[in-house]
Image (spheres, rainbow, N blue to C red):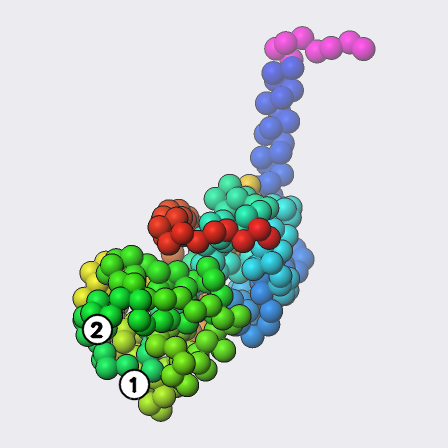
Amino acid sequence: METLPRTNQLAHGALTACLIAASAAVCAQDYPTKPVRLVVGSTPGGGTDISARALAPKLSEYLGQQFIVENRAGATTTIGVNFVARSAPDGYTLLMGVSSLTINPHILKNVPYDVVKDLAPISLVVMAPNIMVAHPSLPARSVKELIAFAKARPGQLNFAAGGAGSSQHLAIELFLSMTGLKIIHVPYKGQGPALLDVMAGHVSLMMANVISALPQVKNGRLRAIGVTGLKRATVAPDIPTIAEGGVPGYEVVQWYGVLAPANTPRDIIAKLHAATVRALQDPAIRERFVSEGGETVGNTPEEFAAVIRADLKKWGKMVKDAGIIPDQR
């Protein structure tokens, strides 16, 4: 078979590259031309699912195609995340990611994807703090009082967490690391049972999400010690942050954000980003998230990527310092 001269081969290669680039540009310009899947790596009803279902109708409205929320739960969200990471990078399969994306690589032995290499951030959607809560019988009423009380009784207090390696568990471990306290971890199979045992007084304290804990704080069954964000929660402005309460620099937030498979064309990423930011500026959407304890974000893909890298580093150090052994799953 006759081969093209070297110069012709180069020209042919350049032409092919141009045609591919032109084709991608046309596809991005027309995108989307069919329904888009927004995958959630957990069961319906949780924070990730709620965030996705709040956002999807607005994306449908702005982009002219249906955005369908699809739950692919299992293996601590890795089934759903891996499905998106291995999907075609054409903008038709997206992920509503959660901050556990940056925890799982450190607590699970066999994560089948690389968060940085296999996913393309689009925008953070919402961020929400946890609240450190205690049974009312605990004498401490503030972060400073808790630190003093626990230091005088090393190993005598305990804390509940809904699963070893969960974001709430690591939030407490970070607090212990930054304060030098020794408080015993009591693992549970979910945040609900853990919260019940703290309310019953079987366990001293825990980190809990705002939605589930705040009603119990208001009815007196739990005492709020501090919120985990750098600023006070909009729904609980009277509760100080842990940072202002005596642990400067302490911050742990649960975040949810939209990501695509790596190598998704930039124009499609830009289109999805613009629609997401526009949706988050809608007063009804903002109010819905605020009422559930969150704050809408809408940052750039680069800013979202920086959050992911910083969290990966923070939780990697935290897991190592806490001596948490990765699960073999």
For residue 161, what is the image quadrant? bottom left
Give residue 38's position: percent from left, percent from top: 59, 61
Disc 2 crowd rating (10 Å Cα; few below 14, some 14-19, many 20+) is some
How far apart marks 1 and 2 lie (CA) works out to 13 Å
Q: Is residue 4 above or below residue 280?
A: above
Q: Is residue 156 visible?
A: yes
Q: Are marks 1 and 2 in contact (CB under 8 Å)?
A: no
- Decide which of tag 1 and tag 2 comes sooner along the chain: 1
Name the side, left or right, on which 65 lies relative to 194: right
Give residue 111's position: percent from left, percent from top: 56, 48
**What residue appears at the point 41 percent right and 85 percent down from the top-left corner?**
200
Which residue does the numbered mark 1 point to in the structure image? 137
Q: Tell how many labels.
A: 2
Element type where label 2 sits in the image: helix
In the image, which residues are magenta?
1-8
Using the image as rendered, state which of residue 198 and residue 130 is in the foreground.
Answer: 198
Give residue 329's position: percent from left, percent from top: 60, 53
Using the image as rendered, state which of residue 322 and residue 67 is in the foreground.
Answer: 322
For residue 25, what is the image quadrant? top right
Q: Main secondary structure of the magenta part?
A: loop
For residue 141, what is the image quadrant? bottom left
**What residue appears at the point 40 percent right and 66 percent down from the top-left corner?**
185
Using the image as rendered, state which of residue 319 and residue 270 is in the foreground.
Answer: 319
Amino acid type of the residue that numbered disc 2 sits on in the rendered structure: Phe
Amino acid type of the residue that numbered disc 1 sits on in the rendered structure: Ser
The disc label shown at residue 149, or none: 2
Disc 1 crowd rating (10 Å Cα; few below 14, some 14-19, many 20+) is few
Name the side, left or right, on which 325 lies relative to 317: right
The disc label shown at residue 150, or none: none
Using the image as rendered, state which of residue 19 and residue 56 is in the foreground.
Answer: 56
